Amino acid sequence: MNKLIIVLFFSATASLAQTQQWQGKFEQLDTKLPTPNEYRSASGAPGPKYWQQKADYVITAELDDTNQRITGSETITYTNNSPDNLKYVWLQLDQNILAKGNMTRKTLTSSMADTLATKQLAQRVSDFVGGDNIKSVKDATGKALPFTINYTMMRVDFPQPLKSGAKIVFSIDWSYNIGDRMLDGERSGYEYFPEDKNYLYTIAQWFPRMCVYDDVVGWQNKQFLGQGEFALAFGDYKVRLTVPADHIVAATGWLQNPATVLTKDQWARLEQAKTSFEKPIIIATQAEAIEREKTKSSLKKTWEFNATNVRDFAFATSRKLIWDAQAVKLATNTPLAMSFYPKEGNPQWEQESTKAVKNTIETYSKYTIDYPYPVAISVNTASIGMEYPMICFNGGRPNAKGEMSDRKKSGMISVIIHEVGHNFFPMIINNDERQWTWMDEGINSFVQFRTEQERYKDFPSWYGFPKDIAGFMKSDKSIQRPVMTNSEQIIEFGAEQYAKVATAMSILRETVMGPELFDKAFKEYAQRWAFKHPKPADFYRTMEDASAVDLDWYWKGWFYSVDHVDLELDQVKWFKIKSEQSTLENKGVKVQAGDLATSATNKPSDFSKGPQEITMIDTPERFYGEFKNKVDDKGIRTKLEGKNIYELTLKNKGGLVMPVIVEWTFKDGSKEIERLPAEIWRMNESQITKTFVKDKEVASVIIDPNQETADTEISDNVFPKKAAESKFDQLKKN
């Protein structure tokens, strides 16, 4: 029965006959996610019996600037808040990634070529003696505790199980040789400056650290292979660092003895910075740094730092460091944004670094929680960026003339924002990086994108714009992995775990949920899991719980598959109602050419043939039975006469279901955008047909006009259809 009544009321089912094999894209994730329990609730919040361990450290360490070596001693107070009795504990020896025979080198595939960079070969034949040298492990009485080292993990056994609710105190003496991070590419190490024969040390993963023991996986003692980062317990730190007397030290925590290690002028400037909200105060000047570069003092000074409720501790030290700081006023706290950099970073670092730190703290605080720590530090290095509580190491330097292109400058700012932003993800909202990289790198990259776009005009963000991820999404599927893949099995690490997730979060905010709902749910997640250990299910459940938006289809598509977005506007048909009336009993009504009967085989490429005419009949009784007389057939007919009716057929060619955004351009030049939720695909995941009624005639139709959904092929989103450009035409343009 090819009549308008079917088009208007039953067009949603018309395309079911063309449905491909059903993939359950809108089925719930319940069977994939862990069962809620008393530790982690179904809402995504910590449960009433949620627990986590605590690891407090007292560390004393000395830097040997002549031999590039660190020697240290630490005392760990470990609190067992779990319901389990523990016969042993596991610690991370991350420096063993540079030890002879390490698993990373053994499992790293490599090949030869006609031309290789010296660095590539040097790494393969390096004679550097790396790795932790564990001298002793003792209990609180000084008695030796047995320990076993398995590559980057060390097990310490107790004479008696550590009972639930109890504490244990034990100590470790250790040392290691510091690697050249410019050669080995590691996150921690030294950079040598041959011009003035000085070193800049950025020291991290430098002491034996407790593994996380939690309610989901028990001990997270998966080997450190280099790509998957860290899982760490919160605790309090007291750290004493002995370095050459002419060094400046930047570290996690608050400096406890400024009168001992700073000059009177530097201490006064530090105090001044606490109330300087408009601009940074230079605490250690470039002129002072240049003088220190020449001294090479043989004396030592010990810098003392305390940090409360942090998951790690890192520091940087050099006689080359310039230091500036500025106060940042938040609703509940006034931290200091700080930067440390050699003269080789100027003038850009003095101009931009602390400004970027401030912008980051303020923007992230808006989206999550107020930054709770006393300082946020950006340290300039010549290599990759890396993050730790309150401190991060960031690349980006001008050339020898102090010049930097706009592209490199924006890249430098991006790195600073990204690494400072890691203070929130994962240093505060403390996910397991060893297992789920996306929970910190991807989510952090999203808030980085928000910071760049809100604080810098026309900023060329690396990721976050949907159109920028389209190329990767449609690329070779054999090297793609779902976002929900362990960190060590991912090939396209940056594209998937950073860019894809940042873009997914951006689309979720701007297109799927809307900023208001998204921001409330996202902030709820941050508040629930600040200073705790969230898992993916906690994020998924919280975002739905706090917004009343069913997002299981979104997680399944963007995080559990390698599908991509590719919608095709397959057909657009234009109809108008015939002015004459007809009744059900009118047996003489004939279907005309161009009516619905032939439209299935007629696939126009434009509106040049005009509308197809539709004959309206009174509502058949079989549709409404005894209620037939309550249907105002005449009134409906009157409302529709003169209207333009458009039937759109869309195909989902990429597999990833998404909202449908339709832009109508009318003949008078006006435009209208309609947004259809992704649930329009719930009955048919591969093809949908929908009818629209418009007062004005349509000149053109575009799907996803502003490229909001990362559609990988936008040429087939347009009607009237455009002829594909021939190779000859392409060559003529060139």
Image (cartoon, rainbow, N blue to C red):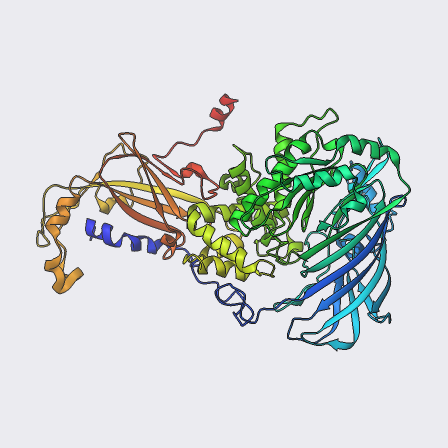
Q: In screen coordinates, is 299 left or right of 689?
A: right
Indicate the quadrant where residue 149 lies: bottom right
Q: Is residue 631 above or below residue 709?
A: below
Relative image position of residue 601 (x, y in whole percent): 29, 44
Q: Is residue 357 above or below residue 107?
A: above
- Residue furthest to the bottom: 160
Q: Nearer the viewer, residue 552 or 634?
A: 552
Q: Nearer the viewer, residue 471 or 343?
A: 343
Relative image position of residue 497 (x, y in whole percent): 59, 49
* Residue located 70% across and 74% down the image: 166
Residue 372 seen? yes
Q: In screen coordinates, is 618 left or right of 148?
A: left
* Residue located 63% across and 58% down the image: 432
Number of marks in the rendered image? 0
Residue 312 seen? no
Relative image position of residue 453 (x, y in whole percent): 52, 38
Relative image position of residue 301 (x, y in whole percent): 85, 46
Q: Nearer the viewer, residue 334 or 46?
A: 334
